[in-house]
Image: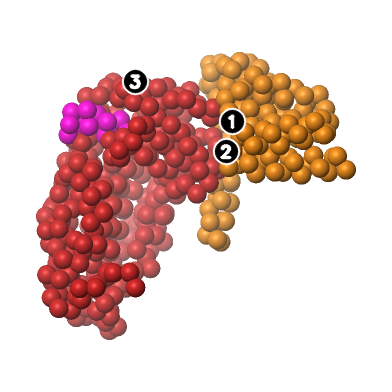
Amino acid sequence: MTVKEAVELLRKGFSYAKMTKYKEALAYYNKALSLDPNNPEAWYLRASLMIDTGRSKEALLDCEKALALDQNYAPAWSKKGLAYYNLEQFEEGLYASTRAASLNGNDVNAWYIKGVCLDELGRSDEAQEAYGKSLELEIILDIESEKKKVGR
Amino acid sequence: MKTEMPLSKPIRRFLNTTEELLDTEISLLRQPDAESGGTLVDIYTYDIERNVIIFPAQYIGLLKDFIIAKHCTNLMIKGAAAKRGEYKVCSYTEDSVYRGLRQIYLDALKDEVNKKDKLPVQKLIRMLFILFSHFNEDLNELPWNAIVNASVYHRMPKIRKTQLYHVMKESKNDMDEMMDQESIIPRRYFVLNKAMFYARDMFLSKTLPADELMPVLNIPQMKKFNHLEVKEMLTTRWTHTAWYQSKVFGDNMLEIIEKPLNQVNWSAEPTLDYYYDLYKVGINLSNHLLGYMTMRDWYVWEEPKHLLAAHGNKGNYEKKALKKIFGDLIADSWGDPV
């Protein structure tokens, strides 16, 4: 029962986060985590919120928690890459985003963060490759989104 | 600039330089329903404290970076002119609206004579100001679009592929403009509208350089005009189509666009003076386009707040102009909400 309740709380928290009502979202996420701390998605969602509110160090800790529960949880690797990038730890950011992109090749964010980290590390040619992949995926997303608009 | 969004190195640098040179602040805002080309809400146009660049939520990586680069360049141009107290936009007044609407009406009458299905009078009357506004918007956008894209291309080589995708998408949308109204609006204005975008795209296809952007390749109605010999063009019925005419007018407009822009040193040091010079080039170019389209007395160069006020008064301007043209045909309640 608590697991089901926790999922419902996460859903509510996520809808608040989408409306940038971070305080409310955080309250729901915290409650969900107290009910079920073994769900990597819950840690990942809180990490996302931390990033959105400029708390990259806390985000990093939440990503670690998620990955401790599931080493192959791609979204947490992706978010971890972003957190490292924000903290200007580009080597670590590159490692995390590379891991994310290898687990989920369709993660635009992961490829983009990989590109920016490589760029910061002065590895321009490799950065261009990662940017290229990121752009390819972003264009697909954009075309899908345009189609949805037309269909609306 | 305070943001938690990841940005590629050249974009971050450009944002910082823009803020520094203009002594201003730029916020980035992601919105699900934002315009696909993004929007710049700037302190030189609106009474606000900081500039905001808005872009669609699905733009996560380089597409977002391109939108930022584009609007930052635009902001630099506006800011450089504003800092000298010279920033002006293409606006309109009660009198200029009358001149514009009257001219469109006269051109519409010429078209109507040869039309099988005549346009209902009320529809024709409503079309006049819509068309007038359309050209006002396009003239405030199109010359700057060419300048901004050329600048971004030369200054940000890392996002060129992204730029090409975006420009192609934009070009397609612009060319689709007015398509539904082709049979309604006077031929002259349909042709001029298409010609402006044709010229912009031709300029960008040469600048970027990207064959895919050439209207004679990517616009279905224009494909047949590619690689045609002059003799062939002159002896076929194509000469009578709006699309062929758009190409002819567009080729002339391309010269108007190319002449000043080919003289710009796109890799010169990007100082405030440099962007001010770009502003002057844009104004000069816009004036030439206005002259070519014989619309010089339709619009006035004024401060942005003048244009905002004009937008606020547009219903009134339209009604007064229509009353002058059509007299009693326009009731006092014309334009009032039903």
Residue B20 is marked as 3
C-beta proximity under 8 Å, tags 2 and 3: no
According to the rendering, which colour does chain A have? orange
Q: Which residue is mark 1?
A: A52
C-alpha gap between disc 3 and disc 1: 25 Å
Q: Secondary structure at mark 1?
A: helix
Name the kind of residue labelled 1 in the image. Answer: Asp
Front position among marks 2 and 3? 2
Q: Which residue is mark 2?
A: A20
| Chain ID of residue with mark 2 | A
**Magenta segment, which residues?**
B75-86
**Residue name at image x 72 percent, y 25 percent:** A63
**Residue name at image x 62 percent, y 33 percent:** A23
Name the kind of residue labelled 3 in the image. Answer: Glu
Q: Picture coordinates of residue B145 (x, y %)?
A: 32, 43
> For the residue carrying disc 1, how many other residues have a C-alpha within 10 Å: few (<14), some (14-19), or many (20+)?
some
Front position among marks 2 and 1? 2
Q: Which callout, 2 or 1, points at the residue further toward the start of the chain?
A: 2
